Image (spheres, grey):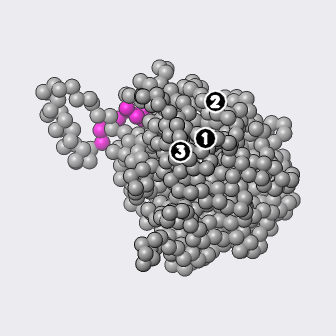
Amino acid sequence: MTDRERAPRGGPVRLADLGLTPPVRRPPERGRPWLVPVIILAALLAAWGVVAVVDSGGGGDEDLAARPSGDATDAGDDPSPVSTESTLAPLPPFDGWVNPASSGRPWSETVPGILTFRGNPTRSFYGVGPVPTNPVVLWSFPAEGGMCGASTDGSGTQTWCGTGWTGQPSVWEHRDGRTWVAFGAYDYAVHWLDYESGARLLPDFRTGDIIKGSVTVDPDGYPLLYTGSRDNYYRIIALDREQPVELWKIHAKAVSPTLWNDDWDGSGLIIDDYLFEGGENSQFHIVKLNRGYGPDGKVTVDPKLVFNTPGWDSQLLSDVGDNQVSIENSVAISGNTVYFANSGGLVQGWDISGLKNGERPTRVFRYWTGDDVDASIVVDAEGFLYVGAEFERGNARAREVGQVLKLDPRKPDDPLVWSVKDQKPGKSGVWGTPAIWKDMVYVPTNAGELLGIDRMTGEVVWRKDLGSQTWQSPVVVDDVLIEGDCEGNLHAYDVRDTRRDPPELWSVKLDGCIESTPAVWKGRIFVGTRGGKFYAIGDPPADRRSPVTEDAAGRSGR
């Protein structure tokens, strides 16, 4: 159990590619005649597949010029991030569900955007730059009041406001030519807003209770959104009507046995017409969607639950001594394996290679951390798992293995590569999902620290004390690390040089604890807070005019 169940203290693209393919730095054209043959030669070399000499820092000179100068070095810059879509090299062939080499890349070639929590099936894509350099709040939603709702948990009925853990919005290029933003909130509703103005694009879709997790947008272009709610249902919502329409839902008690809770916090994955989702009923579910279009041209689904399995086993319940073992994280997929963990600390991998042929998935990996793992598992291009665990039970196993772990699932009998301990008095450890970038792992802690950890060795290279609880999962775009704290400060740090304590580039003060994960998309950052609002943050518009916003009743104004 986590105190998240109680009120807390308060594109086509520039992308973070884990550096699978470094960017090609093209020289500027200066109108000099001798450059012509050079350019022609470079084009021929590119056509022949020759790899050019590259800069290891990611991004162009315009990005570097906007940041403070420092002793940026090449230390730890291999691999390097890709910054533009044109620099993405083709992925190596892979016959399976998710190409491991796609870690760090955008999820969909059909729908550019951040479509699910942390962007892709390996939970490792953070968005598209440029990142703002002098950010201000461009608009907030709603214009008046806040997004609030009453909800009951183990400590009674409370009023919850804004967006919470994990609460990352989806941002995508819609086929209508606009950029859409969608998120679920504590006012029981899913909202769809215009990227530019914050105006509603669709009427709100209301559920029966608060929405804590991150929505998922269909990656194959079907006008569908997938979301869970604390009202015990996980839903599929059609977006091609005048108002959003529920096409299907599944109740947490539709399968058995279940344990502890009926919420749906996880952000589902949709791959090859299958939905993969874990629930706080502690079951893992696979649904065949059977998506299509009806005679009227409207999208249809005919979902069938094809597999479910308990996220626990008898050994786990014996080891932890309780049944509070719900799945709150978002499942990750790499290769032919689905990974997830639960609040009993059990990390699992299930082989789905034969699913399309009617074969039942089988468990191929099991590792017990000893304590609650609500953070999503992140998988790198080599198949290593990065896991953040809480320190609540304080048992011997949690003390032994630590709270930030790198695991190698290819060594199931001894998978621990390294670990970092965070065992301060009270509830400590990790609630936010780790971020991998170049040679580093960035991890926030419940005690308010932000850690920079060497991916190879597990050495803590630097620590920052943010002064308050940090549940927001960090994101990194164009060598800028973004992390929010529970005092409402959204921080940006320069991580071009991964071996130094990164200097702060800027911070923006928002109203309320920032639990939700930001989405970075083409010059803007979108994030909600527990203060009740959802924000679009970016550099001031050139004309300094206020953008159109929309209040809670849907009225537009300036």
Q: Judge whether residue 98 is colored magenta.
A: no
Q: Amino acid at mark 2?
A: Lys
Neighbourhood count class around disc 2 (C-alpha, 10 Å): few under 14, some 14–19, many 20 upward: few
Q: Identify the residue under disc 1.
A: 143
Q: Give the overall secondary structure of the magenta segment.
A: loop
Q: Is residue 296 left or right of residue 288?
A: left
Residue range of the region highlighted in magenta in the rendering: 51-60
- Is residue 529 depicted above or below 97 in this figure? above
Identified at 59% across, 56% down, the residue is: 204
Identified at 69% across, 51% down, the residue is: 186
Quadrant in the rendering for residue 510 = top right
Q: Is residue 410 left or right of residue 538?
A: right
> How far apart in space, not on screen, are marks 3 and 1 (Cα)?
9 Å
Q: Identify the residue under disc 3.
A: 556
Q: Is residue 409 left or right of residue 40?
A: right
In-front residue for pair 218/412: 218
- Could you say whether the residue bearing mark 2 is in a helix, strand or loop? strand
Of badges 3 and 1, the one in the foreground is: 3
Q: Identify the residue under disc 2.
A: 509
Q: Amino acid at mark 1?
A: Ala
Query: Decide: marks 2, 1 in contact (CB < 8 A)?
Result: no
Q: Position of residue 182 (x, y in %)?
A: 55, 52
Identified at 86% across, 53% down, the residue is: 156
